Amino acid sequence: MARRTMRRMVGATAWPWARATRSLSLSAINDNRIIMSPPLVTLDLPEIWTPPDSHDCNPLPQRNCSNLQTATVIDGKSIAEEIRSGIDKEVRRMKESIRKVPGLAVILVGERRDSQTYVRNKIKACEEVGIKSIVTEFADGCTEDEVLNALSNYNQDSSINGILVQLPLPQHLDEGKILDAVSLEKDVDGFHPLNIGNLAMRGREPLFIPCTPKGCIELLIRSGVEIMGKNAVVIGRSNIVGLPTSLLLQRHHATVSIVHALTKNPEQITSEADIVIAAAGVANLVRGSWLKPGAVVLDVGTCPVDVSVDPSCEYGYRLMGDVCYEEAMRLASVITPVPGGVGPMTVAMLLSNTLDSAKRAYGFT
């Protein structure tokens, strides 16, 4: 008797749901679709942040706090130099043992000044540690086939262990297609779908981890910051930084939230985080009111802000981060500056990935 009553109750409760399901099924059949959810790429929206009203920061945080402090500043430049010193020794050992050195090829498309500067810095860093480097430059109006042909040549060149396509590319080029064409074994930027996929899956090991996220984790570990079990917020969800950083934090057992341009209450979400990694590309987006006292803050943003009226700025602009540094200094326990924080680590991780690729290719241990 009890069983029969329960069945009637379930049936009565389930009926409206079943009717709705039947309606959805009929709708799906009528437009020749079985699954109603759309392709994921159709959900992609432009990541347009609303910048703060002012680039100015206050010397004090916007909320009262009884335990104001001064954050410990992570010197990314000195940590990167230490890593590069180790790479230099390994490259010398490789050259002496097997008469080979790692090789990095860079493809630069267009004449963006920032991209040209980044490439120059990477080539200079290669020279300093003994890594062979070569750059192929294309004009803004080059064809996709020209870039793909250059990639094909580098893929087949056994002296090249790493290939880097400097981003962003001009809009007429298919970025996904070009990145997919990089050999998995030479994808030292870590952007190949298989590398990102293996980064996302437990029990899998990517051949390469993207350089900036890898540099962020290295900074945390070398600074004695505990990641396991901590609440982490990544601000920004780009394929280059935000997405792989969130995946890497999860692999290190953090509980991760992603804040993006369409997030409601980003300030509230971020203010609950033990670790904040800002990678939105919006100067001074993260104010003191966004931070929990004692939070660890890594600022990936490098935003050139026009300060042509300031005679102390040689180039007419100042690099600023996503985080309002003056306010964050009074709340955070640990923080990275801009410049001199995450940036040097990105280059160091590129060199490290290239060395690892060469060791793997040559069977050198």
Image: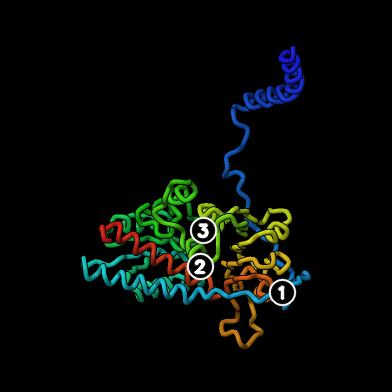
Circle nearer the N terminus (1, 3): 1
Q: Nearer the viewer, mark 1 or mark 2?
A: 1
Asked which quadrant contains residue 61, the reply is: bottom right
Badge number at residue 255: none
Which quadrant would the N terminus be assigned to in this image? top right
Mark 1: secondary structure:
loop
The residue that mark 2 highlights is: 219
Residue type of the residue flagged with mark 1: Leu
Residue sitting farthest toward the right:
64
The relative height of residue 238 versus residue 309 in the rendered view (above or below) is above
How far apart are the two marked residues, 3 and 2, measured between alpha carbons? Answer: 18 Å
Badge number at residue 240: 3
Left or right of 40 in this view: 22:
right
Q: Position of residue 343 (x, y in %)?
A: 51, 70
Residue type of the residue flagged with mark 2: Leu
Circle 1 Cα neighbour tier, 10 Å, few/some/many (<14 / 14–19 / ≥20): some
Residue type of the residue flagged with mark 3: Ile
Circle nearer the N terminus (3, 2): 2
Q: Nearer the viewer, mark 1 or mark 3?
A: 1
The residue that mark 1 highlights is: 68
The residue at 61%/67% (across/down) is 297
The residue at 70%/24% (across/down) is 23
